[in-house]
Image: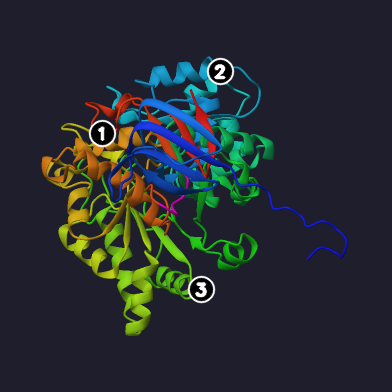
Amino acid sequence: MPPAGEPPVESPRRVKTLYRATRVRTMTFPPEGEWVLVDERHVERVGIGEPPPADRTVELPGCTIVPGFVDAHVHLSGTGMAMAGLDLSDARSREDALEQVRADPGAEPALAQGFDETMWSDPRLPTRAELDALAPQRPVLLVRADGYVSVVNTAALGAATVEGLEGVERDDAGEATGRLRGEANAMAQLWYFESLPGRVIQEAQLRAAGLAASRGVTCVHEMAIPDKRGRRDVEVLLGHADDLPVDLITYVADRDLPWVVGDLGQHRIGGDLFLDGSIGAHTAALSMPYADADGSGTLAYEDDELAEFLHNAHLAGLQSGLHVIGDAAIEQALRVWERVYGTLSTRERRHFRARRHRLEHFEMASDDQVERAGALGLAISIQPAFDATWGHPGGMYERRLGEKRAAAMNPFRTSVTRGLEVGAGSDTPVTPLDPMLAIWALEHHHDPGQRMTRLEAVRLCTIGAARLAHLEKKGRLEPGSAADLAAFEDDPLVAEDVRDLRPVLTVSRGREVYAR
């Protein structure tokens, strides 16, 4: 109450906005409308016919409005750095990659991301000597698309102080070739990102979030990796989260519970906590050796160590996520979660299942592993563009694993039909931050038996991805849902080829964050 004699303080007036289009796809019931009425950050109504009064009206004739897309697995800093720096994703040979590095001016350390030697006719990686010839004084770091292999020159090898670490490849004479894996690879990337001013990291994150908005994405699940980006990276991100054009959900791949919960105030942990690596880099943990190389990859943790962390995280009320690609890594995740689950009472098991602990990637899962994940109530975060990029006949999966194992990769439909919670993401910058590419990939899986219908594919990129993070009011348009939507000139539910579709308008949390 105001003091006696003073006029009452008026509450700020709420502004209602009406978005009127040819069609509104709600992803719920009723499935279609003609307009959406937004009250600040929430949807008030979706309907047809004469619209209700509003403070402002946005006319979108000929357009289709859909719920804002959710990308369930992103790396914003890496994506923003690739957008502004050296992006080698289009390099089609070692020579092409080296030429792009040579043509890049500057005296600061150089980071070039995104090369994929499996797309080259000659898959040999660049060497330290070749990078030294281009930039003898300037530290140069080339990072593979999946982040599990890097190539550095002599200047970077010394600056990053990785010479004595595990993962430094050496030639027959014992000299470092410049190719790094494992601990050395992670430390080299950590050195680079920790050398950047905070404003550069912040600008990269803003660029990536802006890209998301321009693709109709209104919410992203950031997979922070302190081992490779440093703790400052996620601290910077959380510091300006409210200023990003899209909603942010953060998973921190660190086992330090006091830091994640106490210092960062997070309710989620892990995400891209690596149990193994990637198939392309021969670091995914397999039950049988690779078809084109010695070894079968390695697991990052012993069972006891992992079980203690996951049990403590669960008891702390956190939702946990694990990076699992190879079948041996998936097996370890299931084995350890089953061990934790077995210690719980019946009531506690219900709470466990409701937590939706996540498995990221889940690429080499067998039918039995799908069933066991479902029995535990685990949620599955898939990256459909992985299959589109590497799953075709003669592609990287087939070369690394052989035809039989490659054919069974990415059991998307099996996971959905067996009742698992499944949502889609990009793992950007590994594959493009683009839900349309994910939708196309789900429709064109290398195995016809695993393909999705258009509606099913859109659902995995909206409701499915939202539910992975317990965002029950996102991914749909209905009374009370989040005011997240995107308008397209062509209807994403029926367009012949969705890959080139781009929104004309994106609205996130009731804010118009992108328009063209």
Q: Which residue matches tag 1?
A: 440
Q: Residue at x 26, y 46 (%)?
A: 294
Mark nearest the camera among 1 and 3 is 1
Q: Find residue 438 and report its horizontal and vertical position in percent.
A: 31, 37
Residue 39, placed above or below residue 1: above
Tag 1 and tag 2, C-beta contact below 8 Å: no
Determine whether, in the image, residue 303 is placed left or right of residue 209: left
Q: Amino acid at mark 3?
A: Ala
Q: Residue furthest bottom?
A: 345
Q: Which residue matches tag 3?
A: 316
Q: Find residue 247 and report its horizontal and vertical position in percent.
A: 52, 46
Q: Find residue 170 and report its horizontal and vertical position in percent.
A: 43, 39
State the SS at label 1: helix
Q: Residue at x 52, y 35 (%)?
A: 208
Mark nearest the camera among 1 and 2 is 1
Mark nearest the camera among 3 and 2 is 3
User: Label 1 crowding class (10 Å Cα cut-off): few <14, some 14-19, many 20+?
Assistant: many
Q: Nearer the viewer, residue 195 or 349?
A: 349
- Classify residue 16 by image quadrant: top right
Q: Earlier in the sequence, mark 1 or mark 2?
A: 2
| The magenta segment | 479-483
Query: Residue 104 got which mark?
Result: 2
Q: Nearer the viewer, residue 265 or 70?
A: 70
Q: Amino acid at mark 1?
A: Trp
Determine whether, in the image, residue 57 is placed left or right of residue 330: right
